[in-house]
Image (cartoon, rainbow, N blue to C red):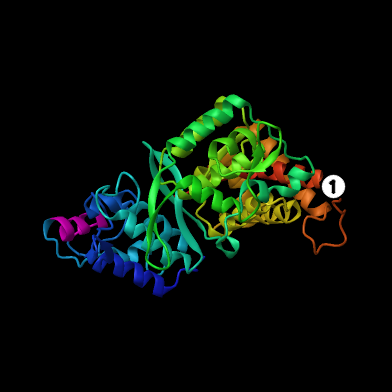
Amino acid sequence: MKRISEITKRDILDLFQNGIEIDEWFETKKVTYPYFGRMNELDFLKRLYDLKSMRSLDSRFQDAESDIWQHTVNNDDYPSCWVFEDERFQLKNGSDEKYLKFICEIFHPAVRFEKGYWKEFLAEVNILLQNDGYELYPAAKISSRDVYGWRIFQPEENSIFIPYSQRNLKAIKEKRISLSIKRNARNQIYQLLEKYNDIYQKTDETGFSYNVSISEEVFNDLRQFYTPKCYNDQKQYVETSSLQDFVYHSSPFCVMDTIEFFVKHSCSNEFEAQLNAILKLNDLDLKLDNGKIVSTFDNHIKKSTLVLIEEAGLKELLQEAIQYYDEGNLKIAVEKLWDAFERLKTYYSPTLDKKKSINRIICDMSNNKEPYKMMFEKEFHELTAIGNNFRIRHHETTKTDIEDNRHYDYFYKRCLSLISVAIQYLNIG
C-alpha cells in the first residue's frame, strides 16, 4: 500500500536533516536528532537489513555492508540522511509498510538516545504521518520502555473522549455487562489516584495563571456526560466534587470513567501497570490499555501481536473490526473481520496464488505437523463456509440472516481466534 505521499517523506527527511524548532525557557531554538540515535549508521541499518546480501554502489566492494562502512565510517563522505533516498532501501519509492518499519526502528529503546530530543521528533513525525492515515503508537514494552509500532490512524470523532460507561451504555442497560467493585478494591483505586493527583498551573484566555489538580480536571470532564453523584451517609444520591466519595460511593462504571479521565491528565508511565495490578489482584476482568478500560475476557488481538502485521490493508480491517466490536456494533465488526479473513488468505500474493498462500499459512501454523495441519485446514474451510452461507456482509441478500447478536458474537470470536493465531506465524522479513 502507498498512502504516504512524497511530500510527507520529504518533510520527514527534512526533520532529520535540518532539525526542528522547540520552545524552551521562553525562547525558540532549533534542535537536531540523528535517525540512528545512539548507534552508528551501519549498526542501525544492520538491525533492519541483511547488508551482505545487498549490492554495493561502489565497484571496489562486493556488498552494501562494505560499501557503507567505507563511506560512513572510514571516509564519512556520504551526505546526511543519504539512506532515505538510496533506492536499495526502498524508503523513497517502496511500500508504506517498509517505510513505517524503518521509522519505528528509529524510536526503538535499543536505538534511541534517551537524553536526546527523540520525543519531540516522534511527535513531529506523527503529525506528518497522520495526514496520510498512519500513526506510531506504544505497541509493547522492553525494560519498562515503550516500543513503537505503526497502525492506521483513527481520529476520535469530534476529538471528544467517550468514557467507559458511555461507550458501553447500551450493553450496561441490557445487562450484558455487569460490574461490582468491593470496598477494598475501591480503597486501593482511590489511594492510587490520590498518589498521582498532581497540581499544575494553567493559564486562562485572559492570561491569568491558576493552579488546578488532576481530580478537578477529571470532574470537569465527567460533567460533559453526566452530573457526578454518589451516596451520602443518609443513602441519598447527591452531587459531589470529592474524589474519595465518588470512588467509594458511586456506580462501579463511574469509577472506570474516573480512571480513564485520570489517565488523560496524568504524565506517569507507571500508572497503567499499577492500576492493572490492582484490578488483577481483586479479580476484576478488566485492564487499562492505552488509556481505555477494556475487558480481559473479550477475545482481542494484543497490540504486540497486531504490530507484527506488515500489510496495511489487513491491519486496517482488524483495527476497524476491534473498534466496532468495542462500540457494540457487532454486525459491522463481523463484516470487517470476515473481510480481514479473506485478506489474510492472500497475504503472500502476488508471489503465491490464493490457494498456495493459504497452504503456506497453514503449514507455518502447524509447524508442518499433520494433526495440526488437518485441524487448521478444517477451521479455514469451516470459517469460509460460514462466510458463504450466512449473511455476513449486509449487501448479500440471498444468504441466511443473522438475527441474534449472540450469534454475531460467536462468529466474531471464532474467526478472531484463528486470525489472532495465524498472524503470529506470518513471515515478517
Q: In the figure, residue 317 lies in which quadrant?
A: bottom right
Picture mark count: 1
Compared with 95, 293 (above or below) is above
> Would residue 44 appear left or right of 316 to someone viewing this image?
left
Q: Which residues are magenta?
A: 61-73
Q: Nearer the viewer, residue 189 or 245?
A: 245
Q: In this rendering, does residue 23 appear at all?
A: yes
Residue at the far front: name it: 234
The secondary element bearing badge 1 is classed as: loop
Occupied quadrant, residue 205: bottom left
Looking at numbered disc 1 in the image, what kind of residue is underneath it? Asp
Q: Nearer the viewer, residue 338 or 18?
A: 18
User: Against 410, is 284 above or below?
Assistant: above
Residue 147 in percent (x, y) is at 40, 46
Task: Indicate whether residue 69 is drawn in magenta.
Answer: yes
Residue 25: x, y in percent? 23, 60
Q: Is residue 255 magenta?
A: no
Residue placed at 78% from the left, 47% from the top?
408
Q: Could you say where residue 55 lies in the image, as x and y percent from the top left?
A: 29, 60
Task: Say left or right for 5 vs 348.
Answer: left
Characterize the magenta stretch by its predominant secondary structure: helix
Residue 177 sits above or below residue 345 on the image: above
Q: Is residue 290 visible?
A: no
Q: Position of residue 2 (x, y in %)?
A: 49, 68
Q: Residues within 10 Å of mark 1 (few under 14, many from 20)?
A: few
Residue behind mark 1:
404
Which residue lies at the image location 27% right of the left edge and 47% below the top edge?
Answer: 114
Q: Is 215 left or right of 410, judged from the image as shown?
A: left
